[in-house]
Amino acid sequence: MPDHDHDQHRAPGEGDAAGNGFAGRLRERTAVLGTLDPEEPLDDLEPLRALIGDARVVALGENSHFIQEFGLARERILRFLVQRCGFTALAFEYGFSEGFALDAWAQGEGTEEDFARQTQASIPIGLSGPLHWLRRYNRTATLPVRFAGVDVPEAGGSLLPALAPVAEYLREVDPDGLPLVQDAMKTAERFACASMALAAPAWARLDTGEQDALSTMLTRLRTRLRAMEPLYVGRGGRPAYDIALRRAEAACHTDHQLRAMSELYAGNGVPADASAREVFMADSVRWLLDRSAPGTRVVLPAHNAHIQRTTVSFDGRLTSLPMGHHLSHALGEDYFALGMTGVGGRTADMHLDEHTAFGFRVEDTALGAPEPGSVEAAFVAAGLGSDIALAGLRAHRGTEPGEAAEAAPDRIRMHSGYLRTPVVDAFDGLLSVPATTVVDDLGF
C-alpha cells in the first residue's frame, strides 16, 4: 500500500507528473519503507508479501556491486522472507562447488577463522552479512535455512574448485577415470586466478592446441560421469554422484565462458556466447529446488543484469540471456525478480585492470540526475525520489486504454550508466533508494 503522507519531504521538482501516466500509477502501486536497517522491525516490509505471492524463488538485485544500501536492503529482506514468509534456502552469486563448505558453516560447523579462510579469495559482493545472520538464526531455528552457491567456480576464475573435488570422488568410485581429471587440472593450474577478468587473458595465452585439448578432456570427463552413472551411484550413492556431475558441468561451462570472454575482449565474440555462465546459474537454482524438500522457497541475491527476465543488450547488440530469463521461462510466476536501484548518490564503476587482485579496480563515481525515460526519473516524477520505495511492476505490464506503450521506462541505472530494457517486463518489482554510497573498505 502506498504512503500518501510523505509529500511534505519531496525533493524540489518531484511530483510534477504524479497524477498522470506511468508516474501516477507507479505512485499508487508503491509502498514507502521506513528504514534499510536489518536490525529494525520488519513490519513495513509486509507489502512485499502480497507482491511475491507464492513465488518459489525471489531474486534480490542491485544495479552495482559494492553498494552499502543494497547490501543492507538485501539482508533486511532476507530476514523478512525467512522469518515472515517461510523461505528456507539462500542461493547466492557464489561458486556452486565452494558453496557446500559455506553451507556447513551456516549450519554451525567450524569457526570464524574457517569462514575467513573459505572466502578470502572471493570477490566481496556482500556475502558476509547474510551468512553471519544465517548462522546466528540457525542456532535456534526449528527449520534451519540452507546456503547454496549457484555460480561457476571462483566467478569464472578457476576450474580447480570444481575439478579437485571430482578428483577425490573418482579416487573413491573409479580410480581408472582419475587420470582424465588430473590431466585437466594440470592445464587449469596454469591460468587459475581469482576472477574471470584475470583468468580469460591468462587462458588466452595458452596455445590453441592446449585450449582445445582442455575442452576435449572436460567434455570427456562429463560424458564419462554420465555414462558410468549406475556404477557410480552403486558405489558412492546418489547425492555424491549428483554433486560430482554438477561440478563437472561447472567446469565445462567455465571453459566455454573463458573462450567466449577471450573472444569478446579480442573484439570477435559471438553474440550472447557469454550466456554459458547465466544458464549454469539458472540450472543450479533448479537443481537446488529439485533436491530440496517440497515447499522449499529460495532467496536469490545477484546483480540486476543476472536476475532480469528480459535479455541483455548493449548498443543494440544481444549480449546475454541472463539467469532470470531462463528462470522466467522455467518457473513462470514462481519466479519473482526484485531489482534494486538508486535515484542519486555515488556508485562503484568497475574498470578492467590485470594488475589488481580481481582483475578490475573500483572507482567511486558520482551519479548525475536521472535520465529522462529511466525508471529512476519515474520515481522522482511520482514524488518518491526521496523515499525508500518498494514498487510492484507486474500490474504495469501491457498498456491501459489510450496510453502509449513508450510511456513506461526503457532504462535502469547500471553502475554510472544505464541498461536499456523494458523495465516493467524485466523486473516484477523494484526497490528504489534516494542515494547510494560505495562500501567504505572493500579490502582489495
Image (tube, rainbow, N blue to C red):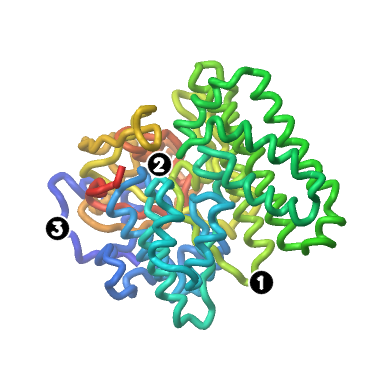
Check disc 2 and report its element: helix, strand or loop.
loop
Is residue 23 left or right of 136 when viewed as pictured?
A: left
Marks 3 and 1, how far apart in space? 46 Å
Please name the amino acid that badge 1 sits on: Pro
Give the residue displayed 42% in from the left and 68% down from the top.
Answer: 111
**Which of the pair 136/407 is nearer the observer?**
136
Q: Earlier in the sequence, mark 3 or mark 1?
A: 3
Q: Quadrant of the C terminus?
A: top left
Please name the amino acid that badge 3 sits on: His
Classify residue 421 by image quadrant: top left
Residue carrying label 2: 408
Q: Quadrant of the N terminus?
A: bottom left
Q: Earlier in the sequence, mark 2 or mark 3?
A: 3
Q: Earlier in the sequence, mark 1 or mark 2?
A: 1
- The reply to whether residue 381 is in sight is no
Check disc 1 and report its element: helix, strand or loop.
loop
| Badge number at residue 9 | 3
- The reply to whether residue 409 is in sight is yes
Up-down: is 89 above or below 350?
A: below
Give the residue displayed 31% in from the left and 52% down from the top.
Answer: 432
Marks 2 and 3, how far apart in space? 25 Å
Q: Nearer the viewer, mark 2 or mark 3?
A: 3
Give the residue displayed 44% in from the left and 62% down from the top.
Answer: 114
Q: Nearer the viewer, mark 1 or mark 2?
A: 1
**Which of the pair 129/233 is nearer the observer?**
233
Is residue 31 left or right of 441 when viewed as pictured?
A: right
Up-down: is 288 above or below 133?
A: above
Number of residues whose C-alpha sits closer than 10 Å to that of mark 1, classed few (under 14), some (14–19) or many (20 or more): few
Please name the amino acid that badge 2 sits on: Ala
Residue carrying label 1: 294
Is residue 235 left or right of 16 when viewed as pictured?
A: right
